[in-house]
Image (cartoon, rainbow, N blue to C red):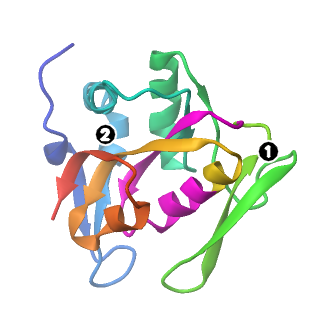
Amino acid sequence: MGPAVDLKQVIVDIPDFPRPGILFRDITPVMESPQALTAALDGLEGLLDGVEFDRLAPIESRGFLLGAPLAQRLGLGLALIRKAGKLPRAVHSESYELEYGSATVEMHTDAIGPGDRVVVIDDLLATGGTAAATGRLIERCGAEVVGYLFLVELVGLGGRSALADTPVFSLVQYD
C-alpha cells in the first residue's frame, strides 16, 4: 500500500454541469490515477469489513469501474445492473421516477438467486432513486440487499432515506 491519497483532493468539482446550478463531482481523475484508484478500492473494501455477502451488484456504468476490480479482489462474482435493453437474455426489470421522466434498470434473471446476500455498488449516492430501484430488483429475486456501497455520497440530497434500513457505506461525503 502506497502513500495515503486524499480522494477529495483528486475528485474535481465542475460547476454548472450538466446544467446551471449543479455542482458535478467528477470521479474521472480517480480512475486516471493508479494511486487514487488503489486508495478508492482499498477504502471501499475496508468499508465492507464484517459484512457477509455473496455477490456485488454494480450499477451501470461507473459502478462497473469500481465493482469489477473489487469483486476480483474479494473472489466474488458480479450481478450486473444495466439500463433497459442492454442485456441479451431474460431479465427482471424495475422502473423508477427521475426528476423529469422515468428510467428502468435490468438484471439477468439468473444473476442472483433466492437467499443470496448482495451488496449494491455505484460511484455516487445522490437522491437514491437508482440504488433503491436496484434494491427492489434484487429483492424480487428472493435475494437480500445487505448493503449499499458508494465512492461518493452527496449527503445533503438525502439519498440514504430512499434505501430504507439497509446499511449504506460511502467513502467520501460532501454536504
Q: Secondary structure at mark 2?
A: helix
Distance, label 1 to label 2, CA atoms, is: 33 Å
Please state which amino acid type lies under the numbered disc 1.
Answer: Thr
Residue sitting at 21 percent across and 47 percent down? 172
* Percent x, y of residue 120: 49, 44
Please check the rendered image and state whether residue 24 is part of the magenta-colored stretch, yes or no.
no
* Percent x, y of residue 129: 48, 68
Quarter of the image that includes the N terminus: top left
- Residue 30's disc is 2
- Whether residue 100 sits left or right of residue 66 in the image: it is right
> In terms of image quadrants, where is residue 33?
top left
Q: Is residue 20 above or below residue 135?
A: below
Residue sitting at 71 percent across and 47 percent down? 141
For this orientation, the residue located farthest to the right is 89
- Residue 109's disc is 1
* Percent x, y of residue 6: 13, 37
Q: Mark 1 or mark 2: which is in front?
A: 1
Magenta stretch: give its range.
113-136
Q: Secondary structure at mark 1?
A: loop
* Percent x, y of residue 80: 64, 42
Q: Earlier in the sequence, mark 1 or mark 2?
A: 2
Please state which amino acid type lies under the numbered disc 2.
Answer: Val
Residue sitting at 34 percent across and 73 percent down? 17
Q: Is residue 10 above or below residue 12?
A: above
> In terms of image quadrants, where is residue 5?
top left
Please check the rendered image and state whether residue 127 is part of the magenta-colored stretch, yes or no.
yes
Quarter of the image that includes the C terminus: bottom left
| Front residue of 16 and 57 | 57
Q: Residues within 10 Å of mark 2 (few under 14, many from 20)?
A: many
- Whether residue 133 sits left or right of residue 113 in the image: it is left
- Whether residue 134 sits left or right of residue 1 in the image: it is right
- Whether residue 96 sits left or right of residue 28 in the image: it is right
